[in-house]
């Protein structure tokens, strides 16, 4: 017997998500085959990840995020902005919210033009500078690698990102890998391309990734707010940099767009 599931499709700077209204909490979050199928671009709906919007006892809602491989992910910045837009569409929130995600509580607000400003967790302590780049956790693990000028467009992000993600250092837990090219002049954006763990491919944009890049770039002279350009569009990251190397009041800002809604037959 076939069943149907109702879904909504969202995207934020080209990072796309299946959104499920799971306020009745009937979705089995351990069914990784189902999540993987829904994210499949040929046999399913197609997305980089899937989000369940669930009720929460103290906050407006809970965001449960899965990568396209079907497994629970850590924090997702673009998915977080899209979940806020989705909660607003459902009438769960108005223009500001506090909600729960994998890495704790987040605040967000939505501007009249639809831009979503999402507060990220503070990043405490010095960032780790390693052989492979700067490693930091912005809700998800991110490696940031600064590239020589005019090399980012031609870079094979899939091959280079994959080689790092599966090397001895990162194989077990994985990492997202961000390749960055600094601006030729201060008014231009930092350019970023990201290989995503859990999608195991380059995506058009990664929100926790550009957040990590902005913080790493602040050690190279970038000041808040940092303007970042991904293949899928532009994002801004604002923050306070502390003398001890920590970052607080981190806000990721950018669009979050409803694309379509529908039903899928299983
Ligand atoms: N696209 C997501 C990244 C999620 C991180 C995920 N790939 C993981 O490592 O669990 C973002 O916008 O932040």
Image (cartoon, helix red, strand yellow):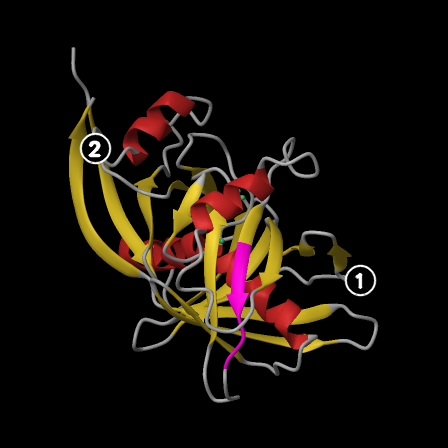
Quote the CA–CA distance across marks 1 and 2. 43 Å
Tell which of 166 and 209 is nearer to you. Answer: 166
Residue ID for mark 2: 42
Q: Position of residue 162 (x, y in %)?
A: 51, 41
Q: Residue lying at the far top in this picture: please name it.
A: 1
Mark 1 falls on what kind of element? loop
Residue ID for mark 1: 125
Tell which of 15 and 130 is nearer to you. Answer: 130
Mark whose residue sits in front, 1 or 2: 2
The quarter of the displayed image where residue 53 is located: top left
Q: Residue at left 69%, top 34%?
A: 168
User: Quick check: can you spot residue 93?
Assistant: yes
User: Quick check: can you spot residue 58?
Assistant: no
> In the picture provided, is 92 more to the left or to the right than 227?
left
Image: 8 above or below 254: above
Q: Which quadrant, please, contains the C terminus?
A: top left
> In the picture provided, is 12 more to the left or to the right than 191?
left
Q: Position of residue 197 (x, y in %)?
A: 51, 41
Q: Residue at left 45%, top 71%?
A: 253
Q: Position of residue 141 (x, y in %)?
A: 62, 48
Image: 241 above or below 201: below
Disc 1 packing (10 Å; few <14; some 14–19; many ≥20)? few
Find out whether residue 180 is within the magenta segment.
Answer: yes
Tell which of 106 and 214 is nearer to you. Answer: 214
Determine if the C-beta at disc 2 is less than 8 A from ligand 1.
Answer: no
Sequence-first disc among 1 and 2: 2
Image: 225 above or below 14: below
**In the rendered structure, which segment of residues is drawn in magenta?**
178-183
Tell which of 43 and 255 is nearer to you. Answer: 43
Q: Position of residue 24 (x, y in %)?
A: 36, 33
């Amino acid at each position: 017997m076939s069943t149907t599931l109702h879904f909504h499709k969202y995207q934020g700077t080209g990072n796309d998500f299946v959104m499920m209204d799971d306020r009745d909490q009937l979705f089995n979050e351990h069914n990784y085959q189902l999540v993987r199928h829904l994210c499949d671009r040929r046999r399913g709906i197609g997305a980089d990840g899937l989000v369940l919007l669930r009720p929460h006892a103290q906050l407006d809602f809970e965001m449960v995020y899965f990568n396209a491989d079907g497994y629970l992910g850590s924090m997702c910045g673009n998915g977080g902005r899209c979940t806020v837009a989705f909660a607003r569409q459902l009438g769960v929130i108005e223009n500001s919210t506090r909600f729960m995600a994998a890495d704790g509580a987040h605040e967000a607000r939505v501007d009249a033009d639809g831009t979503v400003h999402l507060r990220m967790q503070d990043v405490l302590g010095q960032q780790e500078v390693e052989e492979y780049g700067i490693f930091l956790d912005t809700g998800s693990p991110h490696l940031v690698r600064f590239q020589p000028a005019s090399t980012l467009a031609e870079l094979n992000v899939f091959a280079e990102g994959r080689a790092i993600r599966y090397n001895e250092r990162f194989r077990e837990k994985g990492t997202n890998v961000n390749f960055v090219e600094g601006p030729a002049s201060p008014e231009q954006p930092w350019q970023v391309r990201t290989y995503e763990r859990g999608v195991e491919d380059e995506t058009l944009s990664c929100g926790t990734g550009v957040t990590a890049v902005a913080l790493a770039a602040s050690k190279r002279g970038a000041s808040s707010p940092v303007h970042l350009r991904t293949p899928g569009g532009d994002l801004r990251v604002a923050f306070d940099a502390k003398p001890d190397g920590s970052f607080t009041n981190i806000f990721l800002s950018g669009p979050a767009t409803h694309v379509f809604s529908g039903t899928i037959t299983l």
